[in-house]
Image (tube, rainbow, N blue to C red):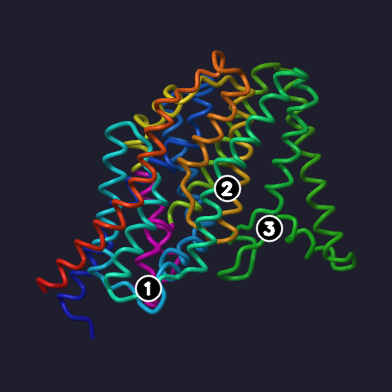
């Protein structure tokens, strides 16, 4: 039987989770997906915040389970976070992210939440989950190099070759192939995601599974490329902006799928099987949506203008690797910072134009990297100290 005190503590933990979801929506998942499009004048700031909230909510519900499970159960070995630990971890992380939102610096939510959860978990007597930490650290280190280089190479190619009717549809084909293999919970068995390509393959039982999946991937890639090529040929620069907005939508969806776990993951061990994971994801998705609608414009402006000045082509170059990296993180269930993904891609695309044309702010980048590293250390130390103090007072 659940006592009144236990129910009240769980309610406070849920409210802390919603606060965390709001800060994520106002910060990383709400601001980053459409920031390149806003910087390229393809969409107004307020409209970008509106769309990113809706798409982030859908991504949270349809793709949020993997990262949520990792954050809730995979960061500390030998201990399950208590309600008090969840409250301390989420409030610590949310406070740091909120400071970043109101000061205009994109604090890495994955860094703060990971540091806070690990700090409280170790304070409870848990053991470090070294294998998971290695996996997370590897992705965090690779993100700026892979994303930045891919964005730089793509933007440089678009600038030098300058044949939008050829290169932009080719990039669209890559995006179509990625979309064909993204897993959605609505397509698979209950609780299991399945991709569009795999769904098509199950409808073709006479063909080898790998061949059917490959054929479906190629077909969708070619279809997307054909539509984008028609748009670019018919409408010129407007066609590039349409493709850019579609990419922003895909990145917004991916942001919801990867970031909601940072807010609701710690709740999953508390609710157990009494509340379906989908319901928890819906609650987190609503928090992201409200955060995007109420707080994201400030950070969208910061990312769109303060780091680099990008046109439509360099914005496209920034969003394609961002989408790919985000989906890889969702697939492996690794918490990743969308601020780190987008900022590195924006900077990579900006450098493709040269130091003058790209308008990359080196001072802003140095301060941002320092804020990322500092948020991880501060979240870990503060959550460990606060939880230890609460335990001594209890």
Give the residue pinned by disc 3.
Answer: 195
Instruction: Provide the secondary structure element on which disc 3 rests.
Output: strand
Tag count: 3
Q: Is residue 211 visible?
A: yes
Q: Kindly check if marks 1 and 2 are in contact, taking CB atoms under 8 A apart as contact.
A: no
Which picture quadrant has residue 40? Answer: top right
Of callouts 1 and 2, which one flags the residue occurring earlier in the amino acid sequence?
2
Quadrant (top left, top right, bottom left, bottom right) of the C terminus: bottom left
Quadrant (top left, top right, bottom left, bottom right) of the N terminus: bottom left
Between marks 1 and 3, how big is the CA–CA gap?
28 Å
**Extreme-left residue of the structure:** 393
Q: Which residues are magenta?
A: 261-290
Numbered disc in front, either 2 or 3: 2
| 378 on left or right of 338 | left
Residue 372: x and y in percent read 39, 43
Give the residue pinned by disc 2.
Answer: 142
Give the residue pinned by disc 1.
Answer: 269
Residue 273: x and y in percent read 41, 77
**Extreme-bottom residue of the structure:** 1
Residue 107: x and y in percent read 36, 41
């Amino acid at each position: 039987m659940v006592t009144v005190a236990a129910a009240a503590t769980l309610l406070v933990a849920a409210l802390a989770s919603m606060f965390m979801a709001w800060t994520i929506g106002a910060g990383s998942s709400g601001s980053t997906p459409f920031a390149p499009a806003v910087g390229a004048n393809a969409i107004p700031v307020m409209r970008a915040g509106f769309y990113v909230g809706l798409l982030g909510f859908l991504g949270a519900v349809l793709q949020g389970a993997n990262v949520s499970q990792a954050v809730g159960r995979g960061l500390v070995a030998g201990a399950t976070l208590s309600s008090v630990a969840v409250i301390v971890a989420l409030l610590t992380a949310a406070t740091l992210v909120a400071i970043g939102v109101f000061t205009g610096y994109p604090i890495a939510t994955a860094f703060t939440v990971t540091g806070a959860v690990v700090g409280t978990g170790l304070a409870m007597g848990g053991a470090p989950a070294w294998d998971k930490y290695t996996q997370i650290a590897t992705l965090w280190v690779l993100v700026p190099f892979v994303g930045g280089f891919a964005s730089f190479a793509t933007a440089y190619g678009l600038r030098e070759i300058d044949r939008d009717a050829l290169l932009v549809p080719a990039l669209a084909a890559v995006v179509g192939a990625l979309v064909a293999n993204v897993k959605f919970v609505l397509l698979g068995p209950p609780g299991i995601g399945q991709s569009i390509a795999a769904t098509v393959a199950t409808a073709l039982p006479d063909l080898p599974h790998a061949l059917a999946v490959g054929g479906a991937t190629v077909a969708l890639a070619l279809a997307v490329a054909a539509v984008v090529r028609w748009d670019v040929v018919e409408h010129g620069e407007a066609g590039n902006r349409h493709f850019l907005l579609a990419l922003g939508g895909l990145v917004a969806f991916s942001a919801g799928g990867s970031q909601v776990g940072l807010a609701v993951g710690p709740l999953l061990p508390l609710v157990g099987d009494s509340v379906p994971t989908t319901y928890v994801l819906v609650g987190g998705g609503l928090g992201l949506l409200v955060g995007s609608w109420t707080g994201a414009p400030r950070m969208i402006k910061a990312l769109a203008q303060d780091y680099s000045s990008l046109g439509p082509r360099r914005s496209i170059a920034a969003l394609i690797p961002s989408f790919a990296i985000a989906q890889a993180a969702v697939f492996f269930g690794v918490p990743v910072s969308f601020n780190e993904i987008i900022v590195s891609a924006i900077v990579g695309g900006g450098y493709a134009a040269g130091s003058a044309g790209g308008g990359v702010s080196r001072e802003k980048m140095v301060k941002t990297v320092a804020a990322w590293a500092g948020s991880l250390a501060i979240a870990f130390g503060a959550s460990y100290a606060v939880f230890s103090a609460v335990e001594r007072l209890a």
